[in-house]
């Protein structure tokens, strides 16, 4: 059975190995984050001290560090690790289900173990194959779900072993405590585990309550067992709260009242149950409406459903105790992500069901065990009908996470009124060089939410890509009116002003960005660029240095510093910075081109040609690099190839005077004694 669980799970999620990193925190966590890359002391120190993106997850970061050592920045490796962890979780849950179903129905073991094994396997596969698991597995950022889930399941399994073992119970117990500590260091959502263990002690283990009593010596021992778990849960909660405070992402009461939080909680509890039964129209973002109507039909149904289920399970607690045990576990696991602790723009998220779905799957396994005893063929029919259907839905859902564009195009299809989905789809299109298509979605976001500063910011950024600087600045102004402390807007506004050669105004906006965010490396680098244009190279270099103190591997700052040094004739020092820029960002065509120019000035034409070739390979429409490559080739007597690159430069930029002169010289076969017409890319804003 364990191998079948692995095979079926991997098969259902196999398309995830073709997925890319997506623009939904993957960029900030992995693509643009150098700090986790490796397991050296600087990386490990960062992992264990950071609250990056509002989470304290050092063990999760360490798994990413291992991925980087094995795979570099290839997404396949990161997805493979998450998939294997999820498949392992399915296997661990199988053994856990086997123990718990045995404890709940000991007579089932006496009547034969086949039905129990099939029921446990069904529970494990129902959990592992469900489409609600896709977000946790196919989204690289959510490694914290599958890793914390692994430690969570192992904690419970080892805890059961500890209380069943007479000889080595203490060793197993402390191992379970250590595993829980690892779960908390992977994701804080596991803080509910002490209470979940207590529920298991009540039912199905029957160590507390009923004939065992609630306050006797045996019961007190059970309560004392939970003390280390509770202490770890408190520490984990403190770290999680500190991370959220640092992120400033929790909604204040002014934004979401207590009554609204209760309504959101009731909606979430019913919403996840409904999606478990009917896992259709799943999306990466179920956006919280700007205004909540507490008496809308969906909320009224949610209140009714939560009250009815709670009351019904309480009434049936003696006859069918599993119902109340599963319901309480479900509520406790979801509590940290419900209304009272609302953070972020979502009213719910598929990933929140990763642990909450365990109890529901276990209950389904128990029901199948009951059916098996009455009608084995009916039980087999249910397994054969449900699991393949879930696997097919999961297979299709995984494809949605293929790229940022496919992900957010799907989200917009599911919820056309989601302003955030439009923003993210627009950003994905802009990254693919489609500013016009991107602007359509930014405009949609503004139509939905006129006071959405980020929509105006992104719209302005897209307009700068089209060269419509005045219109872009209009949107930057609107964004700042809505949100005066928006540092990124001031930075991009400054960049637009630079393109208009309004150096003084640009410098003012870069300085405002830095005043809002003193650790804004990009703004420091751009301020340096502006100062360099003012003829202040020493002050410019100071800003590049500051940017690199904040972000040591900031490729743009190294490039700009190198260009400034090259302008001062310090070619060797400039090459050092171009090299560092490419080490941080290997696909940086301007750095290759400038490095090639510096090498050519040193007389090393062969090495220069290699860098120019890499520049045009990365960016085929890079006119400057084609011109430089042509000149270097002409200098080595390869005139035919040089002419082709000059012509390519002129096809890209018809008024490129330097390329025109070089082409004329090459056609006249003047290769000796000519003046250098290599061009360097100048420092630039980023």
Image: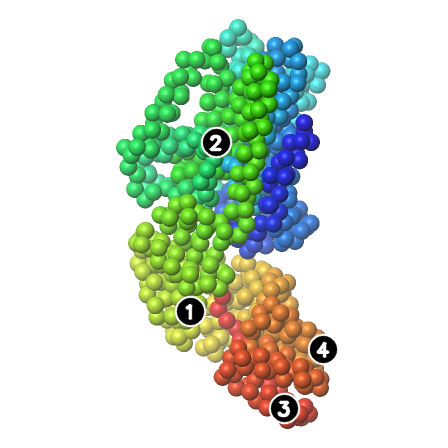
**Residue at 71% over, 86% down:** 637
Task: Name the residue tied to disc 3.
Answer: 667
Kindly report the distance in space between the C-alpha atoms of the residues bearing marks 3 and 4.
Answer: 22 Å
Tag in front: 3 or 4: 3
Q: Earlier in the sequence, mark 3 or mark 1?
A: 1
Q: Quadrant of residue 366?
A: top right
Q: Earlier in the sequence, mark 3 or mark 4?
A: 4
**Residue at 63% over, 90% down:** 667
Q: Quadrant of residue 168?
A: top right
Question: Circle 1 — which element?
Answer: loop
Image height of 10 relative to 515, above or below: above
Task: Confirm whether residue 591 shows in the render.
Answer: no
Number of residues whose C-alpha sits closer than 10 Å to that of mark 4, classed few (under 14), some (14–19) or many (20 or more): some
Task: Name the residue tied to disc 4.
Answer: 606
Task: Name the residue tied to disc 1.
Answer: 466
Residue 440: x and y in percent read: 38, 59
Image height of 572 relative to 214, above or below: below
Residue 426: x and y in percent read: 43, 57
Residue 174: x and y in percent read: 64, 25
**Residue at 63% over, 53% down:** 74
Q: Earlier in the sequence, mark 1 or mark 2?
A: 2
Q: Is residue 435 left or right of residue 230?
A: left
Question: Circle 2 — which element?
Answer: helix
Residue 680: x and y in percent read: 57, 78
Tag in front: 1 or 4: 1
Task: Name the residue tied to disc 2.
Answer: 276
Q: Earlier in the sequence, mark 2 or mark 3?
A: 2
Tag in front: 1 or 2: 2
Q: Nearer the viewer, residue 76 or 473?
A: 76
**Residue at 45% over, 13% down:** 317
Question: Circle 4 — which element?
Answer: helix
Kindly report the distance in space between the C-alpha atoms of the residues bearing marks 1 and 2.
Answer: 45 Å
């Amino acid at each position: 059975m364990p191998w079948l669980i692995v095979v079926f799970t991997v098969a259902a999620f196999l398309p995830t190995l073709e997925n890319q990193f997506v623009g939904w925190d993957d960029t900030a966590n992995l693509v643009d984050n150098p700090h986790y890359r490796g397991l050296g002391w600087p990386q490990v120190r960062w992992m264990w001290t950071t609250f990056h993106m509002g989470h304290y997850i050092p063990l999760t970061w360490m798994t990413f560090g291992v991925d980087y050592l094995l795979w570099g920045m290839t997404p396949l490796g990161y997805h493979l690790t998450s998939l294997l962890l999820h498949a392992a979780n399915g296997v661990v849950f199988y053994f856990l289900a086997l123990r718990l179903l045995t404890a709940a129905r000991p007579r089932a073991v006496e009547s034969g173990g086949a039905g129990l094994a099939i029921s446990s396997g069904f529970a494990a596969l129902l959990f592992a194959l469900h489409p609600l698991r896709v977000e946790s597995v196919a989204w690289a950022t959510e490694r914290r779900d599958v890793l914390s889930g692994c430690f969570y399941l192992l904690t419970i399994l080892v805890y059961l072993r500890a209380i069943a073992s007479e000889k080595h119970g203490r060793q197993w117990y402390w191992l379970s405590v250590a595993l829980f500590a690892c779960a908390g260091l992977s994701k804080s959502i596991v803080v509910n585990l002490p209470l979940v263990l207590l529920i298991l002690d009540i039912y199905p283990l029957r160590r507390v309550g009923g004939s065992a009593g609630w306050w006797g010596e045996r019961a007190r021992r059970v309560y004392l067992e939970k003390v280390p778990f509770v202490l770890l849960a408190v520490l984990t909660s403190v770290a999680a709260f500190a991370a959220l405070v640092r992120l400033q992402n929790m909604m204040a009461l002014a934004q979401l009242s207590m009554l609204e939080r209760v309504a959101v909680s009731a909606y979430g509890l019913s919403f996840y149950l409904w999606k478990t039964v009917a896992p259709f129209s799943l999306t990466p973002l179920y956006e919280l409406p700007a205004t909540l109507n507490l008496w809308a039909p969906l909320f009224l149904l949610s209140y009714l459903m939560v009250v009815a289920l709670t009351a019904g399970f309480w009434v049936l607690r003696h006859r069918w105790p599993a119902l109340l045990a599963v319901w309480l576990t479900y509520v406790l696991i979801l509590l940290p992500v419900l209304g009272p602790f609302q953070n972020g723009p979502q009213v719910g998220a598929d990933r929140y069901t990763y642990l909450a779905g365990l109890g529901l799957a276990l209950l389904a396994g128990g029901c199948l065990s009951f059916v098996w005893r009455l009608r084995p063929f009916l039980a087999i029919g249910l397994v054969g009908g449900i699991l393949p259907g879930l696997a097919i839905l999961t297979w299709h859902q995984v494809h949605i996470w293929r790229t940022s564009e496919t992900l957010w195009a799907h989200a917009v299809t599911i919820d056309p009124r989601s302003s955030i989905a439009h923003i993210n789809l627009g950003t994905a299109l802009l990254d693919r060089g489609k500013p016009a298509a991107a602007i359509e979605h930014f405009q949609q976001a503004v139509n939905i939410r006129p006071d959405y500063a980020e929509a105006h910011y992104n719209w302005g950024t897209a307009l700068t890509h089209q060269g419509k600087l005045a219109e872009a600045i209009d949107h930057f102004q609107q964004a700042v009116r809505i949100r005066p402390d928006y540092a990124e807007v001031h930075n991009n506004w400054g960049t637009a002003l630079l393109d208009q050669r309004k150096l003084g105004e640009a410098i003012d906006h870069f300085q405002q960005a830095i005043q809002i965010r003193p650790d804004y490396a990009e703004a420091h680098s751009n301020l340096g660029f502006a100062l360099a244009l003012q003829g202040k190279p020493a002050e410019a270099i100071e800003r590049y240095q500051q940017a690199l103190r904040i972000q040591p591997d900031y490729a743009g700052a190294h490039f700009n510093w190198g260009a400034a040094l090259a302008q001062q004739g310090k070619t060797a020092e400039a090459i050092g910075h171009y090299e560092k820029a490419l080490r941080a960002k290997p696909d940086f065509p301007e750095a290759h081109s400038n490095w090639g120019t510096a090498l050519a000035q040193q007389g090393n034409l062969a090495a220069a040609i290699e860098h120019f070739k890499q520049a045009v390979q990365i960016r085929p429409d890079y006119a400057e690099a084609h011109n430089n490559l042509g000149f270097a080739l002409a200098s080595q007597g390869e005139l035919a190839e040089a002419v082709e690159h000059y012509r390519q430069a002129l096809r890209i930029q018809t008024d490129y005077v330097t390329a025109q002169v070089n082409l004329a010289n090459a056609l006249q076969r003047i290769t000796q004694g000519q003046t250098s017409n290599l061009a360097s890319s100048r420092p630039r804003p980023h």
